[in-house]
Amino acid sequence: MISIEIEILGKKYRFKSDEPKKLKEYADNLNDLLKEVTEEYNLIDGRDILSLAGMRLTEKVLLISKENEELRQKIAELSDILSNFLAEASD
């Protein structure tokens, strides 16, 4: 494991990771979101910042989950159509 220092909203944290580049990317993404929320709502309180950022992340996760489920359903429908087509073609 590799030790890595990450800064989020001006505070430094130390982590150990097998994938430090990926961890740095995640931290940078989180830091960007927290700064965005801080500036957009002119917030100072860390709990407020984290709450709003958490709501945004939750919204994204739920939207992506819904989109994935819709895609799974479409894939299943297309798979059925293809199976029926192949079955008819082999008759």
Image: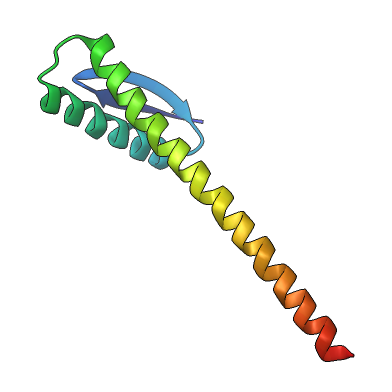
Estimate the x, y position of residue 21 in percent, counting from the top left. Answer: 39, 41
Of 18 and 45, the residue lying toward us: 45
Please tell me whether residue 83 is drawn above or below residue 20 in the rendered image: below
Estimate the x, y position of residue 6 in percent, counting from the top left. Answer: 30, 26
- Horizontal side of residue 41 vs 67, given as left or right: left
**One can see residue 12 in this view:** no
Please tell me whether residue 32 is drawn above or below residue 12 in the rendered image: below
Q: How is the image coloured?
A: rainbow
Estimate the x, y position of residue 69 in percent, counting from the top left. Answer: 58, 48
- Horizontal side of residue 61 vs 83, given as left or right: left
**One can see residue 35 in this view:** yes
Identity of the residue drawn at 84% across and 82% down: 87
Of 41 and 87, the residue lying toward us: 87
Identity of the residue drawn at 35% across and 36% down: 24
Quarter the C terminus occupies: bottom right
Estimate the x, y position of residue 37 in percent, counting from the top left. Answer: 20, 27
Please tell me whether residue 60 is drawn above or below residue 81 in the rendered image: above
Identity of the residue drawn at 63% across and 56% down: 73
Of 23 and 36, the residue lying toward us: 36
Q: How many marks?
A: 0
- Horizontal side of residue 1 vs 12, given as left or right: right
Of 2 and 84, the residue lying toward us: 84
Q: Quadrant of residue 72?
A: bottom right
Please tell me whether residue 46 is drawn above or below residue 61 in the rendered image: above
Q: Quadrant of residue 53?
A: top left
Identity of the residue drawn at 16% across and 23% down: 38
- Horizontal side of residue 91 vs 7, given as left or right: right
